[in-house]
Image: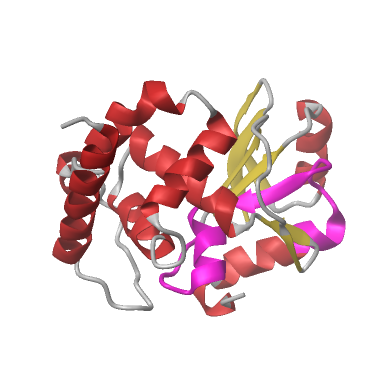
Amino acid sequence: MFTDTLSPDTFRGIKFLGQEKCLPDASYLAGGTAIALRLGHRQSIDLDFFTTKKFNEQIVERRLERTGKFVKDQLDWQTIMGEFYGVKFSLFYYSYKILDKADDFFGIKIAGLKDLAAMKLHAVEDRGTKRDFVDLFWLCRHIDLEDICRLYEQKYGKFEERKYIIYKAINYFEDAEKKDKRELKMLEPVDWQEVKRFFQGEAKNLAKQWGIG
């Protein structure tokens, strides 16, 4: 794992949560921080946790609050959001199947690359921030985008219904360029125009395979 991708508070939070066992069973870290830990391409701060098992929100919230490190922003059905050690924290029940082995990191499970890739493609489809595109770009150095689409289908199903939306999403950058104001702290250099050209080319290839355009 590339620990230099973590801010001191993020690293501190991971180690504390792993030691104190505050999170529900079957919890794992995913999102940009998990991808950064595995690939080492950029710094990431947020603690985005998911669990495949339903949990009691009030019990988990009390566990977190007893640490003295947690500030709650939102408590909802199978959802806890706030800050832990001053960094953004979220925990969601996520029913979708696990595709890959998670690895232990200071008592916290880190999602495997197959799950991270499928989830990041879903994030590009859903919101398409610049960091989502950059993360997916780096994931594509390890898993071809065509294979990531297959992983998406395995994890979420209904791929035939989503093909055109995914095709449009990986070829649409306006929101990423206008709305995503968070600075990317890259540890490995990357050019945004190169990222765009890559996905424009991938979109053309997929369109030919899928018979869309």
Q: Residue at the location (81% across, 27% down)?
A: 56
| Residue segment shown in magenta | 16-45
202 to 207, vertically: above or below? below
Question: Residue 32 at what x, y percent from top left?
Answer: 48, 56
Q: Residue at the location (56% across, 77% down)?
A: 2
Instruction: Choose between 116 and 211: the one closer to the eye.
Output: 211
User: According to the image, what is the colour scheme of the structure?
Assistant: secondary structure
Question: Residue 192 at what x, y percent from top left?
Answer: 19, 63
133 to 124, vertically: above or below? below
Instruction: Tell me where residue 123 sits by quadrant.
Output: top left
- Residue 47 visible in image: no
Residue 161 magenta: no
Q: Locate residue 181 relative to residue 110 in the image: left or right.
A: left
Q: Residue at the location (17% across, 50% down)?
A: 200
Residue 20 magenta: yes
Looking at the rendering, in which quadrant would you find the C terminus?
Answer: top left
